[in-house]
Amino acid sequence: MPRTRQELELLERQSLAPYAQFSADTRGRKHDEPPPVWRTEYQRDRDRVIHSRAFRRLEYKTQVFLNGTGDHLRTRLTHTIEVAAGARNISSALRLNTDLAESIALAHDLGHSPFGHKGETVLARLMRGHGGFEHNLHSLRIVEELEEKYPGFPGLNLSWEVLEGLAKHQTAYDHPDRRKGFDAKNTSLEAQVANLADEIAYYSHDLDDGLDSGLLQESQLAKNVEVWAQAAHTVKKDHRVLPEECRRYYTIRTIIDLQIRDVVENSEQLIQAAGVKSADDVRRHPGALIQYSPARRKLNLQLRDYLYKNLYYNPIVHRPNVRAVKMLKLLFKHFLAHPKEIGDSSRRRLKKTGLHRAVCDYLAGMTDRYVMLEYARIFGKNIEV
């Protein structure tokens, strides 16, 4: 006999911590649907995100380096997969709901514009006075409205708990949002895990991409970044001489392992000290319970500062993105003047959302390469910085 949803929900009751978010306790979906037969509600959410068009487009959106500039450099999609893996590991160790944490992690960047955070900054400026643009909120628009897959409702009709995680997703890049309906002091522990998994993934793997591109050097990292120095010392002590690629990979793997170990051990202490007994107790708690230790947070701030100075603002990374965001500006102006050229779904929403939002939705949904193709089609030339 196939295992039913009810059996899966019972397994959660038997194996998860009392303060985890149980699938059977979901606050439901905006549009009523028959419950899944052989999946939990959060497993259904995960599958809907993976099968969305917005998820597939992440393959051709910039993480740090402009998409297509290197075969092994990360895209927004590979970053998302790595975040989901980290979220599952942390939530499993803490006896939380891995399916919910994974679903939030997989959906957290669906609303990212082309060309990474620089593209987001451009769209935010262009949308001043018209509701602004912020990728976390746009992730919500995608899953609640813009995806068109089901006959009975717009969007993906995800569970309330996944939407809560997206509404309050926050890392060092982001600004928290307090949307109506998500006004508790805190989110589920699973949503908090997704936040930290995102940070662990992009700092650690941006290190990897920076080294792969030649913009970062191990010798300089050893002198200036204590996180790297500690991990490199551990790898050398345990394995002595390794080939360059293996040494670099294993050093970054060690950094990730140390980060996750710190988050799990420190968070377990915070959870027990807080005395929370349920997921709603967690939401009422005044502070986040999934956190680095103060010592690890200090080390991570040093790493972040080094990456900003030596990678994110490096001219080799910065210059192509400057050229790319100029394309976005010119395309935005063009589509405002020629709204018949925007995509069918965006054009159908013109009366409801207004011209600026419809154009913004259209551009935000583009991949890096499609922006370039559209620019070449309309303007017939490459852009100069």
Image: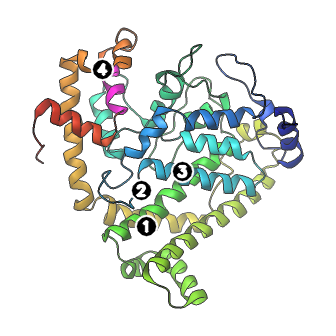
Q: Residues within 10 Å of mark 1 (few under 14, many from 20)?
A: many
Q: Is residue 96 magenta?
A: no
Name the residue at 24% across, 41% down: 325
Quadrant in the picture for residue 26: top right
Q: Is residue 372 left or right of residue 35?
A: left
For this rendering, which residue is in front, 164 or 338? 338
Q: Disc 4 marks which residue?
A: 356
For the record, the magenta segment spans 357-365
Q: Which mark is residue 81?
A: 3
- Image location of residue 303, percent across then percent down: 45, 67
Q: Earlier in the sequence, mark 3 or mark 4?
A: 3
Q: Is residue 223 left or right of residue 280?
A: left
- Image location of residue 140, percent across then percent down: 51, 29
- Evaluate whether residue 42 shows in this view: yes
SS of the residue under disc 1 = helix
Residue lying at the far front of the rendered structure = 1
Quadrant in the picture for residue 340: top left
In the rendered picture of this protein, how many numbered marks are placed on residues? Answer: 4
Q: Disc 1 marks which residue?
A: 208
SS of the residue under disc 4 = helix
SS of the residue under disc 2 = loop
Q: Disc 2 marks which residue?
A: 74
- Give the residue type at disc 4: His
Disc 2 to disc 1, C-alpha distance: 9 Å
Name the residue at 47% across, 52% down: 78
Disc 2 to disc 3, C-alpha distance: 10 Å
Q: Are marks 2 and 1 in contact (CB under 8 Å)?
A: yes
Disc 1 to disc 4, C-alpha distance: 38 Å
Quadrant in the picture for residue 357: top left
Q: Earlier in the sequence, mark 1 or mark 4?
A: 1
Q: Residues within 10 Å of mark 4 (few under 14, many from 20)?
A: many
Nearer the camera: disc 1 or disc 4: 1
